[in-house]
Amino acid sequence: MTEAVLITGANGFIGKALVRHFREQGVTVIGVDLQGDGEQVFAGDIADPESWGQLLDQAQVVVHTAALVTNAMPDEDMWRVNVLATRNLIAAAVRHGVRRFVHVSSIVAYGNAAVGEVDEEYPVHAHGGSYVRTKLAAEHVVLAAHAQHGIDVVIVRPGDVYGPGSRPWVVVPLEMIKRRQFLLPANGAAYLRPVYIDDLARGIVLASRSEKASGQIFNLASEGHVTTKTFFGYHHRWLNRSGPICLPTGVAWAVAELTFRLQRWFGVRSEGSGASVLRLTSKAWFSIGKAAALLGWRPEVALDEGMRRAEAWAREQGLLE
């Protein structure tokens, strides 16, 4: 009998893709998010999992995607959602007899200072803003539960996940380009490791099922890398704009941080902080050999095709007007 899978953050970008991929394979899916839809997704706060504990009783596998993915929120909010709520959730999963807990982390766990090809044995580094630090702390929570209670865990570190509906890699860049606020540090020569959303979802499904995945950490990213100038050049072409503007890191950081603080002073929330700029200075890319060997996973959607789909979606949503 196929195990039932509970997905947190089921209304989110990654969560929605996972719900679709699992259901296409005939798997019973229980979606949980802050706001339910009355049909496929139940309303529930991951910080208080016992309030919907009856759903955990029905699941053998939990895939935890719910998180704040931003550099614009206060540190205490980031910690409360990304770390404390994860601790509460996995503790409840232990109490309710969940067999496997799949935690969706991020390649930011390696820090912005990593250089060259990085595999899963490379040490993590809290070099970055609140998002980096809280993703690291959340991984610690999951591994501690595994060590203390024996719950089967898998940690997935996605690359830069893009595609239709991606806020950090499609929506926000388009918004900032239209406001003429988008610029790149490191003269546009830093690296991104884009992985298309459907490729990521397929990898997470494999990680949730494979016996070889037990207790493992997996990078799910592109093979190799592209420069930030190459990646965000697509967005500028979609909008018929020249660019992107590329600056030395120090200049880009100062401009972004000053603008960010001014906007915050006037009550405007923005992703264009110094921490976001540092996120775009990485010179690392990530080995996916382990995922290939143990899960049989490799990305299938090429960047040109993935960006074509993202552009079509953005046009349908009126984001390119």
Image (cartoon, helix red, strand yellow):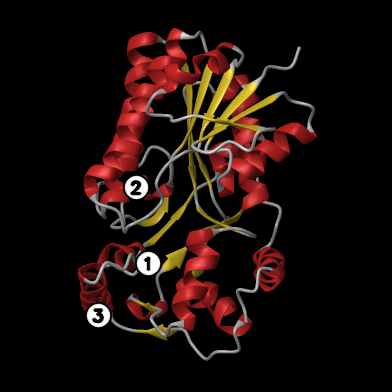
Res 264 → quadrant: bottom left
Q: Nearer the viewer, mark 3 or mark 1?
A: 3
Q: Which residue is mark 2?
A: 110
Sequence-first disc among 3 and 1: 3
Res 307 → quadrant: bottom right
Q: Nearer the viewer, mark 2 or mark 3?
A: 3
Q: Which residue is mark 3?
A: 255
Q: Which element type, helix, strand or loop, lies under badge 3?
A: helix
Sequence-first disc among 1 and 2: 2
Residue at 34% over, 38% down: 81
Kind of residue at badge 3: Val
Kind of residue at badge 1: Leu
* Above or below for 58 versus 205: above
Labels 2 & 3 near each other (Cβ < 8 A): no
Q: Which residue is mark 1?
A: 280
Labels 3 & 1 near each other (Cβ < 8 A): no
- Give coordinates of residue 204: x percent, y percent: 60, 36
Res 150 → quadrant: top left
Q: CA distance from mark 3 to mark 1?
A: 14 Å
